Amino acid sequence: MSLRLRSTGCVLGIALAICYGWILVGASQAAAHADLETTTPACDAALQEPPSAIVLTFSEAPDPGHSLIEVVDASGTPVDGLSAVEVAPDDPNTLRAMLTSALPRGTYSVNWRVVATDDGHVSTGAYAFGVGQAPAPGAVVTTEVLHTSRRISLAAAAGRWLLYVGLALLTGAAAICGLVLRGRVPAHGMALIRWAMVVAVVGFAFSTEAERAAIGVPRLLPLFETHEGALLLAQGVALVLCAGAVVLVDLVPARWALLTLGATAALAMLAHVYAGHAHSPEDGRALHVATQWIHMAAVSVWIGGLPWLLMALRQSAREERSRTFAAFSRLATITLVVVLVTGALRAFAEVGSWDGLLDSTYGRALLVKLALVAGLVGLGALQHFRSVPRVTADADGDVRADATRPLRLTARGELALAAVVLATTAVLCGLAPPGT
């Protein structure tokens, strides 16, 4: 049995490595959310007269205070007479920088960096044009106008993953201890609640620092003065409320205190959702945010409840095990239905078409997540149809061996797979959805 489990784990690990390699192919270009739509001068244009302005139009409104446009010649030297970036008066999605000095004959490169107003994601790019001549292939000269790197992107993804794990554990504690265990926190459970809070705070700190570095502000205060920084600040306030609820549970380990913890964790999730993809579309924004919030909360109850189930089963008598697992199974079934329905709605909204699912980095990452969720559903079905009858028979005295051992092994496999699902979700949040 153990050899079979190890072999299955090796196969799963290899499959996941291949999937993540597939996801990360070209991921450095995929993290942009405000896509460049039109430019003046056009890409690779050969102008007879020098341009009077550089005009860039994006798919989302950029933040002019943290967006840059730089024009350099063929040697990489910035040109003189380029004004500060401003929003075009007739279009909030368009940025322009005026050229007060005429450009001499030659090839020039436009380097740009924008920060999307809705979600704070950073986009960057460069293209070439010529004055009195056509730019040669490969003539684009790139400069360091973007304050980001693969290291910052990884830090942001790691921060989101830690935040998800921490909030899922806190929500699971509220749901299982408050509802299934009727207000009882298992032995050593309070320590896990404290550690979950620490993990969530560390994840938030990673995300905040990554956003500060990506936008290019030197300190946190200028970051929090921006729109995207204000959204991060709201998440921080929600986490402070979570920490207060943890202290409350520590002092008064009652059902109402646990439900308060769940409410504050849900509030922190809402703040995170409001700063993400669901808040980007103009049409039906409230519905998208609500759907994503319910999806995230249901996932947290389902996945975050597994460690608490294992702790409760380990410390319960046979009769109590049957009641606990049956109650968890009913709750998990309800949340699973909610997860699948809301997940399907959000996937359709983000991808938009079959081409978006198959031909985009976001779509490929979503396919990997769907495969992982299918594995979780399979393990959950195994628990429901095999483990519940065994535990019930064990409680009635019909089974001599410990009937919870297969259940615990399967639950640990679910936990490992759930951690990868949350990591995939963290990657998805850093990619541009093709549907939006």
Image (cartoon, helix red, strand yellow):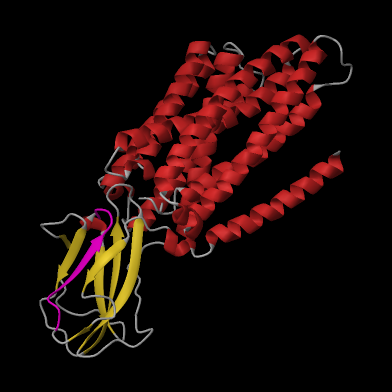
Residue at position x 35%, y 71% in the image? 144
Between residue 201 and residue 173, name the one nearer to us: 173
Please report the bounds of the magenta region as a residue range: 50-62
Q: Give the quadrant of the N terminus.
A: top right
Q: Is residue 52 magenta?
A: yes
Is 227 situated above or below 239?
below
Q: Using the rendered view, name the quadrant where residue 71 is placed.
A: bottom left
Q: Between 84 and 399, which is closer to the camera in this rendering?
A: 399
| Percent position of residue 427, x then y | 50, 50
| 129 lies left or right of 328 | left
Q: Is residue 377 left or right of residue 52?
A: right
Q: Which residue is depicted at the point 56% across and 29% down?
A: 336
Answer whether residue 199 is visible to the viewer in this image: no
Q: Identify the residue at the far front of this view.
A: 354
- Residue found at x 26% / y 45%: 227
> In which quarter of the view is residue 190 placed?
top right
Residue name at image x 37 percent, y 41 percent: 278
- Residue 257 is situated, as x and y percent measured from the top left of the image, at 48, 15
Residue 185 lies in quadrant: top right
Q: Is residue 241 above or below residue 76?
A: above
Q: Looking at this view, name the residue that lies furthest to the right.
A: 400
